[in-house]
Amino acid sequence: MASNENENGIALVKFVTWTLLILGICLLAAIPQWMILCLFGDDALIYTIACFFVGFVLLVCIHLIEPLKYWRPWNYIVIAVCYEFMTLGAGSFLMNWRLVCSIVTMATALLFLGITLLICAVLISTGFYMNPFKLAVVGGMLFVLAFCIELMNILLAWRYWQDVAIGVFLVSVVILVISHVLITYISFEYLVRDDTILVAIVLYIAYILFLIGSRISIIYIKGNADHSATATTSTPYDEYD
């Protein structure tokens, strides 16, 4: 177990509290933007998708370039820009859709994230967990496996390939979040205050991935339901109204 305070004078409880608080602020700021995009963003898809990729590029740069993590105030500015790009990009998956369905998807993604964090808390409190670095490798490999399963649909037609792929994708996100939290926990002695923002942003991105996974799952479920009801071929990419 980590000590109550690390070498930088930060208490574990305080670190967790600030991280969850920042995560909550990120979610509260994002949800109204997604609702607006859901209602009025009919012709903005090309821009929001571009924002999504720019946000990921910025995230990679933040983790690769050390000054972008801890050099104030530029780290706050870059993280805020990355957050906004990711938020607008995630809105791409909620546009042209009913607002109620979008809210249900947001709630489902939040449930996924909450359950994952609860699992992390149980693992940390019991101390019963495997090497988090190896766990991260497993999560990354499952991420690749999900992509390979999608490609299998080209080689061997089966209407449930996408369902399996999205299931593997969601499991990979869960494992990656757990591994990240565990790595953060065992590295707590060396963390500084600004790391709360970085951890919160990673958890926020995990929420976005859960959001995307939930959205795509609904598309596939709707497609399978329509196929079963009509007994005719139905593409899983039909829009869910």
Image: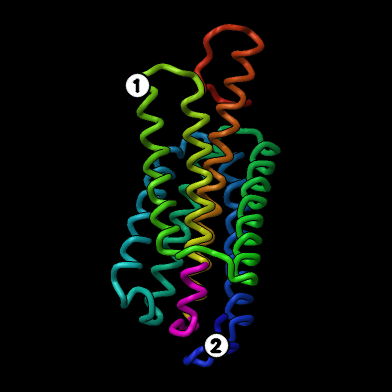
Q: Is residue 189 magenta?
A: yes
For disc 1, the marked residue is 154
Crowd class of label 1 (few under 14; some 14 to 19; many from 20; radius 10 Å): few
State the predominant SS element of the stretch in magenta: helix
Q: Which span of residues is magenta-colored?
A: 182-193
Give the vertical position of 34 relative to 69 (above or below): above
Quadrant the C terminus occupies: top right
Q: Position of residue 128 (x, y in %)?
A: 58, 66
Q: Mark 2 and 1 residues: CB-CB less than 8 Å, in contact?
A: no
Residue flagged by tag 1: what amino acid is it?
A: Ile
Visible residue check, residue 40:
no
Q: Is residue 64 magenta?
A: no
**Residue 144 occupies quadrant:** top left
Visible residue check, residue 7:
yes
* Residue shown at the point (31%, 75%) measured from the top left: 66
Say which label, 2 or 1, has the lower sequence index: 2
* Residue shown at the point (46%, 66%) measured from the top left: 80
Q: Position of residue 218 (x, y in %)?
A: 60, 32
Q: Position of residue 216 (x, y in %)?
A: 53, 34
Q: What element does badge 2 sit on?
A: loop
* Residue shown at the point (37%, 54%) measured from the top left: 56
Q: Which mark is residue 10?
A: 2
Q: Which mark is residue 59?
A: none
Residue flagged by tag 2: what amino acid is it?
A: Ile
